[in-house]
Image (cartoon, rainbow, N blue to C red):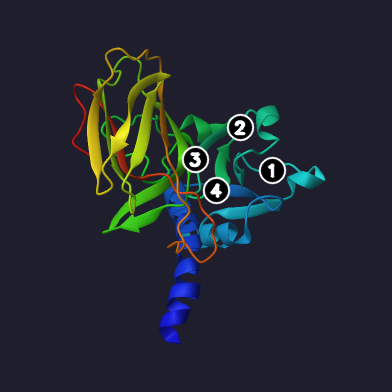
Amino acid sequence: FALYNHRHYLRPIQERARPRLTFALQTSRLGPIDAISFDRSHAEAGMLYGSQYLLPHTRFDLFKSRQGEEPLSEVVIGSTDWRQAARLDAELVLREGNGRSGLWVLPGEFQARLPPAEYAGIRLGAAPRFRIQESGFHAQEWVNGAPARWTDGAAKLRVPFDPGHPPRSLEIEIVAYDRDRVVLQVMANGIELWNREIPPEGWSKSFDLEHVPLGDSLLIELNSDTLTPLEDPAGPSTGRSLGVMVKGIRLRTAASPLD
Protein backbone atom coordinates (compact mmCIF):
# COMPACT_ATOMS: atom_id res chain seq x y z
CA PHE A 1 0.00 0.00 0.00
CA ALA A 2 2.88 2.39 0.85
CA LEU A 3 4.65 1.61 -2.43
CA TYR A 4 1.43 2.14 -4.38
CA ASN A 5 0.85 5.55 -2.73
CA HIS A 6 4.46 6.55 -3.33
CA ARG A 7 4.25 5.75 -7.05
CA HIS A 8 0.77 7.03 -7.85
CA TYR A 9 0.36 9.96 -5.43
CA LEU A 10 3.60 11.19 -3.86
CA ARG A 11 5.80 11.10 -6.97
CA PRO A 12 3.31 12.95 -9.19
CA ILE A 13 2.91 15.63 -6.49
CA GLN A 14 6.69 15.99 -6.22
CA GLU A 15 7.07 16.31 -9.98
CA ARG A 16 4.38 19.00 -10.12
CA ALA A 17 5.96 20.94 -7.24
CA ARG A 18 9.56 20.76 -8.46
CA PRO A 19 9.27 23.27 -11.36
CA ARG A 20 7.47 25.77 -9.11
CA LEU A 21 10.23 25.62 -6.51
CA THR A 22 12.90 25.83 -9.22
CA PHE A 23 11.16 28.92 -10.59
CA ALA A 24 11.22 30.61 -7.17
CA LEU A 25 14.87 29.68 -6.69
CA GLN A 26 15.84 31.22 -10.03
CA THR A 27 13.83 34.33 -9.15
CA SER A 28 15.80 34.70 -5.91
CA ARG A 29 19.06 34.70 -7.89
CA LEU A 30 18.05 37.89 -9.70
CA GLY A 31 18.83 39.87 -6.55
CA PRO A 32 16.71 41.36 -3.76
CA ILE A 33 13.09 42.03 -4.73
CA ASP A 34 11.05 44.24 -2.41
CA ALA A 35 7.63 43.30 -3.79
CA ILE A 36 6.05 40.96 -6.33
CA SER A 37 2.51 41.30 -7.67
CA PHE A 38 0.89 37.87 -8.05
CA ASP A 39 -1.92 37.50 -10.58
CA ARG A 40 -4.54 35.23 -8.99
CA SER A 41 -6.46 35.10 -12.29
CA HIS A 42 -3.89 32.84 -13.92
CA ALA A 43 -1.03 31.66 -11.72
CA GLU A 44 -1.60 28.65 -9.47
CA ALA A 45 -1.76 28.81 -5.68
CA GLY A 46 1.12 26.32 -5.47
CA MET A 47 3.31 28.83 -7.29
CA LEU A 48 2.40 31.51 -4.73
CA TYR A 49 3.17 29.30 -1.73
CA GLY A 50 6.47 28.09 -3.14
CA SER A 51 7.54 31.64 -3.99
CA GLN A 52 6.61 32.94 -0.54
CA TYR A 53 8.60 30.15 1.08
CA LEU A 54 11.79 30.72 -0.94
CA LEU A 55 11.47 34.53 -0.97
CA PRO A 56 10.64 35.25 2.69
CA HIS A 57 11.79 38.90 2.55
CA THR A 58 9.62 39.78 -0.47
CA ARG A 59 6.13 41.23 -0.05
CA PHE A 60 3.50 39.56 -2.27
CA ASP A 61 0.60 41.72 -3.47
CA LEU A 62 -2.36 39.88 -5.00
CA PHE A 63 -4.38 41.16 -7.96
CA LYS A 64 -6.78 39.70 -10.53
CA SER A 65 -6.20 40.82 -14.10
CA ARG A 66 -9.52 39.32 -15.27
CA GLN A 67 -11.31 41.84 -13.03
CA GLY A 68 -9.35 44.76 -14.49
CA GLU A 69 -6.95 45.06 -11.54
CA GLU A 70 -3.34 46.03 -12.25
CA PRO A 71 -0.09 45.10 -10.47
CA LEU A 72 1.19 47.31 -7.68
CA SER A 73 4.88 46.52 -8.24
CA GLU A 74 7.25 46.33 -11.22
CA VAL A 75 7.81 42.56 -10.79
CA VAL A 76 4.83 40.33 -11.63
CA ILE A 77 4.13 36.59 -11.55
CA GLY A 78 1.39 35.67 -13.97
CA SER A 79 0.51 33.78 -17.12
CA THR A 80 3.10 33.64 -19.90
CA ASP A 81 0.44 35.18 -22.19
CA TRP A 82 -0.46 37.93 -19.71
CA ARG A 83 -2.71 40.31 -21.67
CA GLN A 84 -1.69 43.47 -19.80
CA ALA A 85 2.02 42.94 -20.57
CA ALA A 86 2.13 44.74 -23.94
CA ARG A 87 0.30 47.82 -22.65
CA LEU A 88 2.56 48.02 -19.58
CA ASP A 89 5.71 47.35 -21.67
CA ALA A 90 6.57 44.37 -19.46
CA GLU A 91 9.37 41.93 -20.30
CA LEU A 92 9.04 38.18 -19.73
CA VAL A 93 12.36 37.20 -18.13
CA LEU A 94 11.66 33.74 -16.70
CA ARG A 95 9.28 30.84 -17.33
CA GLU A 96 8.12 28.20 -14.89
CA GLY A 97 9.06 24.61 -15.79
CA ASN A 98 5.65 23.70 -17.21
CA GLY A 99 5.54 26.89 -19.27
CA ARG A 100 2.21 28.20 -17.93
CA SER A 101 3.50 30.87 -15.52
CA GLY A 102 6.22 33.45 -15.88
CA LEU A 103 8.05 36.30 -14.22
CA TRP A 104 7.37 39.69 -15.82
CA VAL A 105 9.34 42.88 -15.16
CA LEU A 106 7.95 46.34 -15.86
CA PRO A 107 10.23 49.26 -16.80
CA GLY A 108 11.92 50.64 -13.71
CA GLU A 109 14.85 50.31 -11.35
CA PHE A 110 14.70 46.52 -11.09
CA GLN A 111 14.62 45.98 -14.88
CA ALA A 112 17.59 48.33 -15.30
CA ARG A 113 19.78 46.25 -12.97
CA LEU A 114 18.94 42.85 -14.40
CA PRO A 115 22.05 40.96 -15.54
CA PRO A 116 22.70 40.77 -19.29
CA ALA A 117 21.42 37.73 -21.13
CA GLU A 118 24.60 35.98 -22.28
CA TYR A 119 24.55 32.20 -22.65
CA ALA A 120 27.71 31.21 -24.49
CA GLY A 121 28.80 27.81 -23.17
CA ILE A 122 25.90 27.53 -20.69
CA ARG A 123 23.75 24.37 -20.71
CA LEU A 124 20.30 25.28 -22.07
CA GLY A 125 17.10 23.37 -22.78
CA ALA A 126 17.34 21.01 -19.82
CA ALA A 127 15.74 23.61 -17.53
CA PRO A 128 14.17 27.08 -17.87
CA ARG A 129 16.73 29.88 -18.04
CA PHE A 130 16.62 33.61 -17.43
CA ARG A 131 15.43 35.62 -20.48
CA ILE A 132 15.19 32.56 -22.73
CA GLN A 133 11.99 32.55 -24.82
CA GLU A 134 10.90 28.95 -25.29
CA SER A 135 7.94 26.73 -26.07
CA GLY A 136 7.21 23.05 -26.60
CA PHE A 137 8.84 21.73 -23.42
CA HIS A 138 7.27 19.67 -20.64
CA ALA A 139 8.12 20.22 -16.97
CA GLN A 140 11.71 19.77 -15.86
CA GLU A 141 12.74 16.30 -14.66
CA TRP A 142 15.93 14.83 -13.22
CA VAL A 143 17.95 12.04 -14.84
CA ASN A 144 20.91 10.64 -12.88
CA GLY A 145 21.04 13.81 -10.81
CA ALA A 146 21.03 16.19 -13.81
CA PRO A 147 18.11 18.27 -15.15
CA ALA A 148 16.44 17.24 -18.41
CA ARG A 149 13.19 17.97 -20.22
CA TRP A 150 10.99 16.22 -22.74
CA THR A 151 9.81 18.13 -25.79
CA ASP A 152 6.29 17.77 -27.16
CA GLY A 153 7.69 17.15 -30.63
CA ALA A 154 8.03 20.83 -31.60
CA ALA A 155 10.29 22.71 -29.17
CA LYS A 156 11.73 26.18 -29.71
CA LEU A 157 14.32 28.27 -27.88
CA ARG A 158 15.33 31.82 -28.77
CA VAL A 159 18.75 32.46 -27.24
CA PRO A 160 20.06 36.07 -27.08
CA PHE A 161 23.76 36.84 -27.39
CA ASP A 162 26.16 39.75 -27.78
CA PRO A 163 26.27 40.64 -31.52
CA GLY A 164 29.95 41.47 -31.07
CA HIS A 165 30.66 37.87 -30.03
CA PRO A 166 28.33 35.66 -32.09
CA PRO A 167 28.30 31.90 -31.53
CA ARG A 168 30.50 29.79 -33.78
CA SER A 169 28.83 26.44 -33.15
CA LEU A 170 25.77 24.77 -31.63
CA GLU A 171 26.02 21.60 -29.52
CA ILE A 172 23.02 19.40 -28.73
CA GLU A 173 22.72 16.37 -26.45
CA ILE A 174 19.49 14.34 -26.63
CA VAL A 175 18.04 11.01 -25.48
CA ALA A 176 15.08 9.29 -27.16
CA TYR A 177 13.92 6.46 -24.90
CA ASP A 178 11.97 3.32 -25.77
CA ARG A 179 11.89 3.76 -29.54
CA ASP A 180 13.76 2.05 -32.34
CA ARG A 181 13.30 4.82 -34.88
CA VAL A 182 13.25 8.55 -34.11
CA VAL A 183 13.59 11.23 -36.76
CA LEU A 184 14.86 14.58 -35.47
CA GLN A 185 14.99 17.87 -37.33
CA VAL A 186 17.24 20.64 -36.00
CA MET A 187 16.71 24.20 -37.29
CA ALA A 188 18.75 27.33 -36.50
CA ASN A 189 17.28 30.70 -37.58
CA GLY A 190 15.34 28.90 -40.31
CA ILE A 191 18.32 26.92 -41.64
CA GLU A 192 18.04 23.12 -41.43
CA LEU A 193 21.10 21.62 -39.72
CA TRP A 194 19.89 18.01 -39.31
CA ASN A 195 16.95 15.88 -40.46
CA ARG A 196 17.75 12.21 -39.86
CA GLU A 197 17.22 9.34 -37.48
CA ILE A 198 18.97 9.39 -34.11
CA PRO A 199 19.77 6.40 -31.87
CA PRO A 200 17.43 5.92 -28.89
CA GLU A 201 20.19 5.39 -26.32
CA GLY A 202 21.62 8.87 -26.75
CA TRP A 203 22.78 11.32 -29.39
CA SER A 204 24.99 14.40 -29.40
CA LYS A 205 26.36 16.51 -32.19
CA SER A 206 28.08 19.84 -32.81
CA PHE A 207 26.93 22.03 -35.71
CA ASP A 208 28.94 24.79 -37.37
CA LEU A 209 26.93 28.04 -37.62
CA GLU A 210 29.08 29.57 -40.35
CA HIS A 211 26.24 29.62 -42.90
CA VAL A 212 23.45 30.53 -40.44
CA PRO A 213 22.37 34.22 -40.52
CA LEU A 214 22.93 35.69 -37.07
CA GLY A 215 21.66 38.92 -35.52
CA ASP A 216 21.37 39.24 -31.77
CA SER A 217 19.63 35.90 -31.11
CA LEU A 218 19.46 32.32 -32.34
CA LEU A 219 16.12 30.52 -32.75
CA ILE A 220 16.69 26.79 -32.22
CA GLU A 221 13.91 24.40 -33.26
CA LEU A 222 13.75 20.69 -32.39
CA ASN A 223 11.07 18.81 -34.34
CA SER A 224 10.65 15.05 -33.87
CA ASP A 225 8.33 12.06 -33.82
CA THR A 226 6.26 11.69 -30.66
CA LEU A 227 4.78 8.93 -28.54
CA THR A 228 2.28 8.79 -25.68
CA PRO A 229 3.59 6.29 -23.09
CA LEU A 230 1.23 3.93 -21.31
CA GLU A 231 3.01 4.62 -18.00
CA ASP A 232 4.22 8.20 -17.74
CA PRO A 233 6.70 9.03 -14.93
CA ALA A 234 4.93 12.37 -14.49
CA GLY A 235 1.82 10.57 -13.27
CA PRO A 236 -0.94 8.23 -14.44
CA SER A 237 -3.18 9.28 -17.31
CA THR A 238 -1.29 12.46 -18.14
CA GLY A 239 -1.58 11.80 -21.86
CA ARG A 240 1.62 13.70 -22.65
CA SER A 241 3.01 13.55 -26.19
CA LEU A 242 6.75 13.01 -25.78
CA GLY A 243 9.25 13.91 -28.45
CA VAL A 244 12.88 13.71 -27.34
CA MET A 245 14.51 14.38 -23.98
CA VAL A 246 16.90 17.32 -24.05
CA LYS A 247 19.91 16.98 -21.75
CA GLY A 248 21.74 20.07 -22.96
CA ILE A 249 22.09 22.68 -25.69
CA ARG A 250 25.14 24.96 -25.85
CA LEU A 251 26.30 27.85 -27.98
CA ARG A 252 30.07 28.10 -28.43
CA THR A 253 32.14 31.17 -29.20
CA ALA A 254 35.90 31.43 -29.48
CA ALA A 255 36.07 32.21 -25.77
CA SER A 256 33.20 30.06 -24.42
CA PRO A 257 33.63 28.48 -20.97
CA LEU A 258 33.47 24.71 -20.68
CA ASP A 259 30.12 24.77 -18.89
Counting from the top left corner in percent of width and height, residue 158 is at 44, 29
Pinpoint residue 211: horizontal percent, then vertical percent.
Answer: 30, 12
Q: Residue at x 46, y 58 (%)?
A: 21
Quadrant in which residue 142 is drawn: bottom left
Q: Residue furthest right?
A: 67
Kind of residue at badge 2: Ala
Q: Residue at x 45, y 80 (%)?
A: 4
Discs 1/4, front: 1
Circle 3: residue type: Gly
| In this view, the mark in front (4 or 3) | 3
Residue 2 or residue 180, whichever sits in front: 180
Q: Label 3, label 2: how many angstroms apart (C-alpha)?
A: 22 Å
| Most foreground residue, 234 or 95 | 234
Residue, disc 4: 34
Mark 4 and mark 3 lie on one chain; the one further toward the N terminus is 4
Side of 172 relative to 19 (left or right): left
Earlier in the chain: of badge 3 and badge 1, it is 1
Measured as percent of width and height from the top left, residue 109 is found at 53, 33
Q: What amino acid is labelled 1 in the image? A: Pro
> From the viewer's perspective, is the residue at label 1 or at label 2 nearer?
2
Q: Quadrant of the N terminus?
A: bottom left
Left or right relative to 125: residue 86: right
Q: Residues within 10 Å of mark 3 (few under 14, many from 20)?
A: some
Residue reaching furthest bottom? 1
Q: Residue at x 42, y 52 (%)?
A: 140
The residue carrying mark 1 is 71
User: Mark number for residue 136?
Assistant: 3
